[in-house]
Image (cartoon, rainbow, N blue to C red):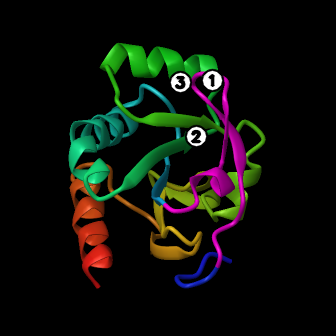
Amino acid sequence: MIEVGKKAPAFALMDQHDQKVKLSDLKGKWVVLYFYPKDDTPGCTVEACEFSAGIKGLEDLDAVVLGCSPDSTESHRKFITKYKLRIDLLSDPDKKVMEKYEAWGEKKNYGKTIIGTIRSTVIIDPAGNVAHRWKTVKAKGHAERVREVLAELKSA
């Protein structure tokens, strides 16, 4: 279970460059890990573009932004190129990490219950603990809210 103050689940996933990204390698940094359903779809594009547009403000807060979806690394490369994204995207085709972060499971979609990606975000502190969690999010405006919460966490 993902709980604020508890250790964030470890992960090692491939990014768009086919390089392994491990949470343990990010120790000492703030990590914004956001989960989204699919590259190049309307809501996911809005969210990725907003994180990318606001990356300077997040980097100024010593944060690394990582998007994660079940898409392939090749799909991520195309998505990044098409929208000139400035964030890294992780590929979780087996959905194992998404399950650990409670970002894969039952959700409502247009009134129907389906199994899929739950759009959510976790902020992980430099010690590797969950500092903040959004169980579900709306794509538009979320990146700025993440920056605001991260600034509050850093000043606390």
Q: Is residue 7 above or below residue 78?
A: below
Instruction: Characterize the local packing of mark 1: few (<14), some (14-19) or many (20 or more) Cα atoms within 10 angstroms.
Output: many
Q: Secondary structure at mark 2?
A: strand
Which residue shows up at 48% across the image and 70% down it? 125
Q: Nearer the viewer, residue 120 or 64?
A: 64
Q: Is residue 9 above or below residue 74?
A: below
Magenta region: which residues? 7-28
Kind of residue at badge 3: His
Q: Secondary structure at mark 3?
A: helix
Instruction: Characterize the local packing of mark 3: few (<14), some (14-19) or many (20 or more) Cα atoms within 10 angstroms.
Output: many
Check whether the beta carbons of the residues at disc 3 and disc 1 lie within 8 A of each other: yes
The tag on residue 69 is 2
Kind of residue at badge 2: Ser
Q: Is residue 12 magenta?
A: yes
Furthest residue in direction front, as rendered: 28
Count the numbered circles shown: 3
Which quarter of the image is occupied by the C terminus? bottom left
Give the labeled residue for mark 1: 73
Give the labeled residue for mark 3: 76
Which residue shows up at 64% across the image and 54% down it? 23
Which residue shows up at 25% across the image and 79% down it? 155
The tag on residue 115 is none
